[in-house]
Every structure is written in C-alpha cells, then in structure tokens.
Amino acid sequence: DTVDQQADFDAVVSAEGRIEPRDWMPDAYRATLVRQIAQHAHSEIIGMQPEANWITRAPSLRRKAILMAKVQDEAGHGLYLYGAAETLDVDRGELLDKLHAGRQRYSSIFNYPTLTWADVGAIGWLVDGAAITNQVPLCRCSYGPYARAMVRICKEESFHQRQGYELLHALSHGTPAQHAMAQDAVDRWWWPSLMMFGPPDDESSHSEQSMAWRIKRHSNDELRQRFVDICVPQAESLGLALPDPDLRWNEERGTHDFGEIDWSEFQQVLRGNGPCNEQRLDQRRTAHENGAWVREAAAAHAAKHSARTSD
Ligand code: 3HC
C-alpha cells in the first residue's frame, strides 16, 4: 500500500539509488520533474534562437560550421529532454502548448539579444559554462531518465563551452576593436549568466524539497559560487575583465566575493518583461506552426507503416 511504497521510494532516494519510470513515486516528485525537465527542454529549444541569429553572419566558414553544429546539438538536447519528460506520462505536444501559452518557463538567459559576433563567444563561454556547472550534478539526479540524459548532454556542452572560449580568445587577442567587442559582450552576459542558477537560496521556493528528493544536488548559491570561481582565472587568461568591481579572492572563505546581483531584473525577465521575451515566444510559435506539416506527414507515415506491418 502507499505507506510501504513511500518507504521504498524514500529508501531508494536516500541510498543514492535511481527511481525509474515504472517505479511508484509521489505525485509531487513527478510534478517537480515534469516542471524542471520541461523547462530544461524548452530552454534548449529557445536557446537556438539567439545563436542562430549569427549562423548567416559568421566571419568564416570554420566559425559557421562550429556554430551550426552547436545549434543542432541544442535541438538534440531538447529532444533528449522531451523524451525524458515523456517517461513521466506527459506528451511533448502538451508541454510545447504550455510553453507557447506562457504556462511553462524556459531559462531567463535566452531573453537577452545577441548584438555582435562576440556574443556567440560569450554565450559559449558563460552560458554553456553555467549550464555545465548546473548540469554535471544533475547526472546524479535520483530520476534515472533525466540523469542519463545529462551524461550525454554534458559531453556535448563541453565542446560548446570550449568553442566559445576559443572564439573570445581570438577576438580578445585580435585588433583593439575586436578586443573591445569581446569585452562588451562579456559585460552584457556576465550578470544574466549568474542569474541562470536561480534566485538566492533564501528565496528559492523549490530547493529544499528538490534537494531532499536528490533532484537538485547543490543549492543555487553554491553552484553560482562554483561558477564564479571557475570563471575568474579563465577571464584572466582571456585578457578580459569581469564587470564586477566587488569581485575579489577571499582567502578565509577560499572563494571569490562578488557584487550584488540585480534580482529585480531577474524577476522582470521571469514576468516576461525581458529584452527579448516576446520575440522569442513569437518566433517559437511561428516555427511550431510552420512545422505542423512535417509532424502531420510523419504521423501519417507512421500510421501507414504500422498498418502495413500489422496486416
Ligand atoms: N530561468 C527561468 N526561471 C527560473 C530560473 C531561470 N534561470 N531559475 C529559477 N527559475 C524559476 C523556477 O522555475 C521557479 O519557478 P516557479 O516558482 O514558477 O516554479 C522559481 O524561479 C523559483 O526558483 P527555484 O530555485 O525554487 O526553482 P528550481 O528548484 O527549479 O531551481 C534551476 C531552478 C536551478 C534552474 C533548476 O530548475 C534547474 O536546475 N533546471 C535545470 C537546468 C536548466 O533548466 N538549465 C537551462 C540552462 S540553458 C541550457 O541548458 C542551454 C545551454 O545548452 C545553452
């Protein structure tokens, strides 16, 4: 009965075991996973837009090929994650409808514009870097399908981060105008990248329960701090400054102190008032409508195929 099922569930989670799709799980655990995995998948798909903006404008064939591969990877990450969400008895069409209706979220970071080519480097270095810092612990998430999807995604994410870093390094060590363009991009993407990790721990409504269920393995502030500590030496070798006058090494804490994040900006973006929220959802809805014929054709083909094989 449910008491035993809850006890079994708790035992598996506390023993760092895996909950699989056919296992009993509390409804709230299922709902939290659907919310987070759907949001994660939506982030990957919406995240294709800011970068795709530069595919036709890349400065060389090499950069264009790399960027195309990365944007294609993000689409694949979205598909893995919609697949992981579907193991929880939800349908990806339903999740996309919720995204299009503004009833499910995607990562705040993709509501900012990509104004210059250097933004492609800043996104790779900072946004994919933050995504890696957030996603590596998710490989140890208690829900099997999500944790396994993360293993493959993290491998591809490190290529994304590396290409962004290398792109910025080339610009930063190029002409003064190229260096200035790289610095401008870092200035614009640094603080929104810190916001990706979510609100401060004392304002995080889901963290406590999510950590008890071993979905979230480290708190928002812990991962944010880890990300800052990773970026400081990388910025030094890039020859670029991080736009935070309060950023300094704290010997006592063994980490960097850093300045106040503007959480009102974060809340505005979450409310849909970021620089690109409307544009991103409009483009997403249009892409979905334009793709309807492909979905219908694939479904018709599948129906014909299964009719043939069942004859
Ligand atoms: N963007 C949008 N919404 C956010 C957010 C963000 N960066 N951070 C938090 N929120 C929302 C939460 O969804 C929650 O909303 P709700 O109250 O409506 O449910 C609210 O703010 C409170 O935040 P919590 O910290 O309590 O929420 P979580 O426990 O879910 O933690 C999280 C937030 C750390 C982002 C967690 O959801 C998570 O780890 N998600 C998976 C990682 C993810 O989504 N990454 C996307 C990054 S982009 C990417 O991967 C593409 C890359 O390849 C370029």
Image (spheres, helix red, strand yellow):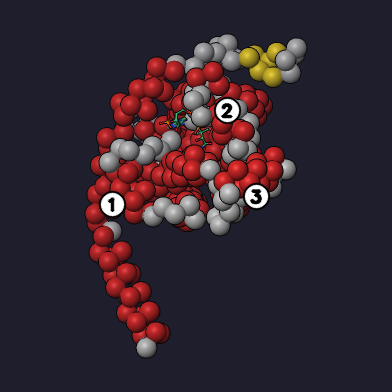
* Residue sticking out furthest to the bottom: 311
> Is any part of residue 21 visible from this angle?
yes
User: Residue 173: x, y in percent?
Assistant: 57, 32
Could you tell me residue 167's position as x and y percent?
A: 53, 40
- Estimate the x, y position of residue 270 in percent, counting from the top left: 37, 28
Per the model, the C-alpha gap separating discs 3 and 2 is 19 Å
Vertical order, 37 against 264 (above or below): below
Q: CA distance from mark 2 to mark 1?
A: 37 Å
Q: Crowding at label 2, few (<14), some or many (≥20) Cα neighbours within 10 Å?
A: some
Name which residue lies at 37% across and 33% down: 111
How busy is the neighbourhood of tag 3: few (under 14 within 10 Å), some, or many (20 plus)?
A: some
Image mark for residue 18: 3
The residue tagged with tag 3: helix, strand or loop?
Answer: loop
Q: Earlier in the sequence, mark 1 or mark 3?
A: 3
As drawn, the residue found furthest toward the front would be 1
Residue at position x 28%, y 58% in the image = 291
SS for tag 1?
Answer: helix
Q: Nearer the viewer, residue 106 or 8?
A: 8
Which residue is the site of mark 1?
A: 287
* Amino acid tagged 1: Ala
Give the residue type at disc 3: Arg
State which mark lies toward you, 1 or 3: 3
Q: Residue at x 51, y 29 (%)?
A: 206
Compare residues 252 and 59 and report the one nearer the observer.
252
Q: Position of residue 69 (x, y in %)?
A: 48, 54
Earlier-in-chain disc, 2 versus 1: 2
Quadrant hosting residue 307: bottom left
The residue where tag 2 is placed is 208
